[in-house]
Image: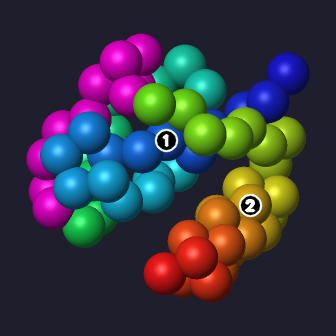
Amino acid sequence: MPVTIVVVCSRCGGLLLAKAGQKTRTCPYCGSKVALDRAKKVASAENAYEASEILRKLKSDASARG
Ligand SMILES: [Zn+2]
């Protein structure tokens, strides 16, 4: 079961990491509280390292598309 999820901030669209089971997470970009059960989940990972790799990939994909 994945322990770390990647969600999109509903306010600024930034990507943030959260632990499975967490209910809210404060966005590091805009400071808003994100309700994780309502946020858009884009990926999940089995550990923090894998999650950060996914995050990096998502960010580079986004910048590659402009
Ligand atoms: Zn945000």
Residue situated in front as seen by the camera: 61 or 22: 61
**Is label 1 within 8 A of ligand 1 (CB to nearest ligand atom)?**
no
Q: Which residue is mark 1?
A: 7
Going by the image, does 41 lie left or right of 47?
Answer: left
- Disc 2 is placed on an element classified as helix
Q: Quadrant of residue 29?
A: bottom left
Residue 47 falls inside the magenta stretch:
no
Q: Quadrant of residue 65?
A: bottom right
Q: Residue at the spot x=79%, y=43% of the render?
A: 45
Residue situated in front as seen by the camera: 49 or 34: 34
Residue situated in front as seen by the camera: 34 or 20: 34
Q: Is residue 59 above or below residue 58?
A: below
Q: Which residue is mark 2?
A: 54
Count of numbered tags: 2
Return the x and y of residue 62 as percentages of the image width and height.
Answer: 56, 71
Residue located farthest toward the front when viewing the structure as drawn: 65
Residue 35 falls inside the magenta stretch:
yes
Picture quarter with the N terminus: top right
Q: Residue at the spot x=16%, y=61% of the render?
A: 30
